[in-house]
Every structure is written in structure tokens, then in C-alpha cells.
Amino acid sequence: MRALVVEDDDDLAEDLVLSLRAAGFVVDRCSDGEDAWFRGDVEDYAIAVLDLGLPCLDGLSVLKRWRAAGRSLPVLILTARGDWTEKVEGIESGADDYMAKPFAMGELIARVKNLVRRTAGQGSPILRIGQLSLDTIRMTVTIDGRPIMLSQLEFRFINYLAHQDGRLVPAGEVAEHLYGVADSTDTNAVEAIVKRLRRKIGSETIQTRRGLGYALAGSAG
Amino acid sequence: MTRSSLRLRLLSGAAAATFLALALAGVGFSWLFHRHVERREADGLIAVGKQIAASVSVDEFGRPIVDPLPANPGYQAVAGGRYWQVLGSGGSAQSASLWDQSLPSVAAPSSRWSSSTAPGPFEDRVLLVSRTIRPDAGRPGIVVRVARDDTPIRTALGEFNFEMGLSLALLWIVLSLAAYVQVGLGLRPLDRLRQEVDRLRRSPKARLSDRHPSEIAPLTDAINALAQTREDDLTRARRRAADLAHSLKTPLAVLSTQSRRARAAGAEGAADGLDRAIAAVGAALEAELARARAAATRASPLSGTSSALEVMEQLVDVVERTPHGEAIVFTIEAAANVMIPAEKADLAEMLGALIENAARHARRQVRITGVIVDDTALIRVEDDGPGMEESFAANAMQRGVRLDETGSGHGLGLSIVRDLAEATAGSLKLGRSSLGGLDARLSWTMASHPPKLR
């Protein structure tokens, strides 16, 4: 798998490259924004680790250009400022995760692997149910072409329902799927997820049968 | 008003000057009035004296004879207050009112009428006119004296002085009030200037208005120039702090890679020491940056309000991508009209730290609510984690204490959130949530924010 490291500090970049190689990636490195934008646009990477403070073109601009060009590779951004406004800007520009400097290399590698695992091995990444389209790589749903950003938990919930062919899924089963071992209080968490999802994708999309469970509207069954 | 008050100095100066002027005027008026009355009375006495001179004759013994006598009854009654006396070489004639007394002699009466005051025969003082006449050339002259009690004159003068004094005192009060109003009007621009400078002190971005009189304009221009310099310095200092943070954080990241290499090479002890140093420097850097941010927030004017719901949703989008947040359900309950009196970036720092902290400790759920109760905006961040002992909560609010020393790096301590909340005139309180975990409450009283200067 190929990874792109965009970092202007040579020492840090070298260590990132070495660590990612040790984790099994084939790593390309560039040190300015223009170069990064070009490489990300023409090459096919499984992941990019992108510093925000770059010469020539800043990291956020690079990310926005990649997304505008339809490049959907997962991107982990590195920020030095570490303030929340910058993190929000990063995520809104299309980043999948962020880490503030200084970071622990082990945690960075774990997060990179997590992002790659999340997006790899999806045969057909788009799943369609009624007006809903589930993009299993970007973890987004679109309703009539309008993209909606979901949290991992929300996406896993809706993805699970989408694979049930309209079967009513009890809250306890959903909780068990989401949390592994679940207890009775976790059904409250499932209700909270449903509440949030309804706000994001519309109240009619997820149907509730009291005492029986949940199903996606428009799925067969 | 203090002793050095400009208003007091101007007012006391004006009051003293008008008092002095009015007192001098009072003395002058009194003197003029006295002279006028005396002159008129003297004229009246001279007229009587002329009448007597016209009707006086001298007998063979040199005694003066007055016929007819002056008609005024005051000359008939003893001690009647009006007297005349004619002195010849052989004797004298005088009014019945003089009884057995005589009018005081005054310095050599001339051949013209002269007036003076002298001790009276029955009164303290009389006004007296006298003259020497010579009915026949070559014979000794006759002295004619006419006098009247001057008590009525002095009484009238006293009454005049009293009434004039009252009038002048009233005039002094009116003039002092006028001076008060005038000084007030004159100083009002200074008062406005003081208020504007006071707001400028609290808000470096504010500037003095240009609505001041032309005499004050150079001062306001100079103050505005000073404020601009100060703001520029502040901006430069903040930029330098951010640059410093950036320039220090990357080397810190590099240092941590060196530590990792050292550990891989078997130097566990050195790596541990390096890691501790890196963590300490990183935490100190974050704390100082956060403090600088709180100080900057305190110094900058409030330019508006921020939507709680918008910031909450943006932050949850970020936190639910972190390893701590991805397994947590975030529930946001806030109406779109919940506006917080803080800059969006500051609100994001406070809420971001609280939400990240909640996600780190939560088991399944984090609930974020925003409500406005009366004139207070309240934001609560609750989790279903283990919560916090009261003593630990108090400790966590102390400066520089990290809630979770093992958590990965960028979480600000609750004390920093509290600093930032206080910098935006809000407050942070910790309690236990109905979900079971920590309940962090940020609140702002909406009425406590003064309007901006411009």
C-alpha cells in the first residue's frame, strides 16, 4: 500500500517515512504544498499524512483541492497550532482524522492503519436503498445526491440496517453489533444514535416499531 | 470632586471672583447712595438757610433778628430734629427746637455754603450747613447754621445697604449657578473623552470618536495613534507566540521520534526521560498558549455572539473521528437561537476541551445541551463515565492541572477552560450528571456585556 507523507521538517518527515515503512507502507514524501497537491492528484495513495503548515501552498488548501478534484483518499492532518478552529476547518475541508504536534508515533501509525482498514477491501463502495446512497469508503450517505457526514458509530448503525433486507432489528442486537458486549443501558445509546441520524438524514428514513426494532425505509422485506 | 478637580478649581475661582466683584460693587453703590442722599439733604438745608439769610436783619446792638421764621414745624418743637441758628456780633437767634443748646461750631464758615456732619445737640449726629453772610458791607458777618438730625438718613442708608446686600447675594448665587452650568458644559467633552478612554482601556480595538470639540481633537488623535500602536504590538506579540508554538512543536515531535529510536536501540531509561521532558514541555506550551489566548480574549472587544448549536455540531464532527470519540454517541440538544456572548474561536476552545474530555471518560454517551434561562445562556457537557469526586473536581479546576495525565496530548485542563470562560465574562461549574458522569456547565449572563464603542 502506498502512503504519502507531506511534511516540511526533514527530521520529522524522515521519521514518519521510516515508521510507515516499518508498518508495511510504500512511502512517498514531499515537502511543499504544490508538490503534494500534484502527487495526490495524479498518484493513487491508500493514505496521506498531511502537515498543515507547508511552504508554497498550505495543507488545508491542498486538501480542499484534492477533494474538489474528487480524490477520496483518507487524509490524516498534522497541526502545530492544535486549536479547535483549525481542527474544525481541517475536518470540514475533508480530513478524516487529525493529530496535534507533538504526537506519539505509535498512536499515529495506529490511526493511519485504522483509516486504511476502514476504507480498504470494499468491493462495491456504494450501497443504494431508496433515496439513500451509502458510500462505504467516505463513510457518508447521500440523499438525492446531497452528501451527509456521519460519525463512525452512526455509519455502522445505518450500514448494519442496510444489510438486513428490511428485517426489523431489535435495539439490543444493534447495541451488541456496535459495542460487542452490550448491556440493557446501551439501548439508550442506540436511541440517541437514531435521534441524531434522523436529524441528519430525515425522520422518515429510519422506522421504529415499538418493542420490535428498527428498519430502513425503502429496503426490501 | 477632589481637591485637584478641574471643575472645583474653575467653580471656586468663578465664585470667588464674582463675590469680590459684587462686594466691591456693593461698597461703591453704598458710598454713592450715601453721598447722593447727603447732598440732597444738604441742598434742602441750604434752601432753608437761604430763606433765613433773606429774612435776617441786625438790630443796633448787633443782634440778628429772623423774621419770618421758617415754617417747618420741626423747627418749633424742642429737639424736633431740625435746627437753625444765626450768630451775630452782638448775639444770636435760633430755632425754638434748639432750646438752650447751641449748634456745634464748625471750622471757619466761609462765604459759601459748606456742609458737614457734627455731634448734634440732642442726637448723636446732625447734618449741618453753614455760611457767613454780610448784610451790610463793613459790618461783621453773620453766621447762618441749619442742621437736621441725620438718623433718618442713616436709617435709609442702612435699609438700602441691607436690601442691596440681599440683591447682590442673590445675584452672586445666580452667577455661581451660571458658572456651574458653564463649567459643566465646558467640561462635558472631557467627561465623554474619559468614558471613551475607559472603554478603550478595556477594548484595544476600540477607538475614540471624532465627535469632540476642535480643542480636544489633537488629544484624541494622539490617543488613537497610541491605541493603534498598542494594538499593533499586541497583534505582533500574538503572532510571535503562535509562530513560537509552531516552531517549538515540530522539534518536539522530532524529539519524540529520537526518543522512540533510543528506545528501539535499548536505551529505555534515556527514552523515558526524554518522553517525560517532551510531555512537560508540550503541556507547558499548551498551557501558556491557552493562557495567552485567554489574556488576548480578555483584552479584545466582543464583536458579536456565536451560535452554540453550530459550534457544537462542528466540534462533535471532529471529536467523533478521534479514537476516544468514535465509539461514543453524541447527543446535541440546543435551539438555533442559543447565542453565546463569545468569539466563535473562544467558544470552540472551551467546548472542544470539554467535549474531548467527556469523550475520553464516557462509556457510551455524551450529551451536549444549550439553553437560555432568563438572561443566562447555559451550556452543559455531560457524559456517562465514572464522574469525578468533588475533591478531584476542585483540584482539576486549579491552574495547570491536566484531568487525564495519560490522555494524548492536546486537551486543555479544565482550569484553562475556566480561564477562558472568565475572560468572556462567563463561568465554569462542575457537577454530577444524571447520566452518571461529569456535568460541566458553562454559563454567561447576557446583560453583563456593555455595547461596543463603535
Image (cartoon, grey):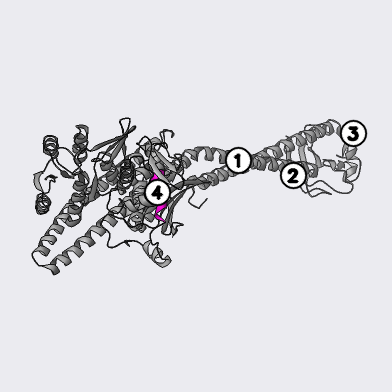
Asked whether, in this view, residue A153 is left or right of residue B439, the answer is left
Secondary structure type for disc 3 = loop
Span of residues in magenta: A181-195
**Where is residue B136 drawn, in percent x and y?**
80, 32
Q: Nearer the viewer, mark 1 or mark 3?
A: 1
Q: Residues within 10 Å of mark 3 (few under 14, many from 20)?
A: few
Residue projecting furthest to the front: A221
- Read off the residue under disc 3: B71
- Tag in front: 4 or 1: 4
Kindly report the distance in space between the C-alpha atoms of the residues bearing marks 4 and 3.
139 Å
Is B77 displayed left or right of B202 in the figure? right
The answer to which of marks 1 and 3 sits earlier in the sequence is: 3
Q: Are marks 1 and 3 in contact (CB under 8 Å)?
A: no
* Separation of marks 3 and 2 at Cα, in angstroms: 30 Å
Of tags 3 and 2, which is closer to the observer?
2
Instruction: Kindly identify the amino acid type of the residue bearing the numbered disc 1.
Output: Leu
Is label 4 in contact with label 3 (beta carbons under 8 Å)?
A: no
The numbered disc on residue B177 is 1
